[in-house]
Image: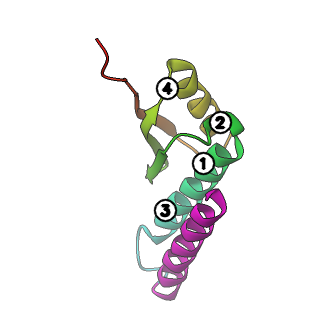
Amino acid sequence: MITIKRLTIFLLLTQLVLLSSCAFSPNQPGMEEKYHDVSLTTKVYEAILDEPSLRPFDINVRTQKGIVELSGYVNSRDDMDKAIAVARKIPGIKSIKNDMQIQTTGDY
């Protein structure tokens, strides 16, 4: 399942990069920044998937102007902190925005 997810993400990101590079010209501001953001998103997502304790969670990664946003649900604050720590190891990130939430069972 994880391999299919990785392959799907890789193919989508590859298409985005290829389309971006076809349209790239030095006069187009922001294309290099968009490429950098896609690259950071891919690296963070792969690092999270490579961490066995984070695999069960559906953590989403989004990057805009070097700021990485993590969202989704985890079981505890420790899981949240682990995901942030994994993302911080990736060079080139300006900051990390944490939009992850802790899952609740709904039992009162």
The residue lying toward the viewer, choosing from 26 and 71, is 71
Label 3: state its secondary structure. Answer: helix
Q: Which residue is mark 3?
A: 33
Q: Which residue is mark 1?
A: 44
Q: Is residue 21 magenta?
A: yes
| Mark sitting earlier along the chain (1/3) | 3
Label 4: state its secondary structure. Answer: loop
Cβ atoms at labels 4 and 3 below 8 Å apart: no
Of the residues tagged 1 and 3, which is closer to the observer?
Answer: 1
Of the residues tagged 2 and 3, which is closer to the observer?
Answer: 2
| Mark sitting earlier along the chain (2/3) | 3
Of the residues tagged 4 and 3, which is closer to the observer?
Answer: 4
Amino acid of disc 1: Val
**What residue do we see at 55% from left, 66% from top?**
9
Amino acid of disc 2: Val
Cβ atoms at labels 2 and 1 below 8 Å apart: yes
Question: Is 47 placed above or below 39 here?
Answer: above
Distance from the alpha carbon under mark 1 to that under mark 4: 20 Å
Label 2: state its secondary structure. Answer: helix
Q: Is residue 91 visible?
A: no
| Mark sitting earlier along the chain (4/3) | 3
Cβ atoms at labels 4 and 2 below 8 Å apart: no
Distance from the alpha carbon under mark 2 to that under mark 1: 8 Å
Q: Is residue 4 magenta?
A: yes
Q: Which residue is mark 4?
A: 75
Distance from the alpha carbon under mark 2 to that under mark 3: 22 Å
**What residue do we see at 37% from left, 23% from top?**
104
Q: Which residues are magenta?
A: 1-23
Please tell me the numbered disc located at residue 86. Answer: 2
Distance from the alpha carbon under mark 4 to that under mark 2: 17 Å
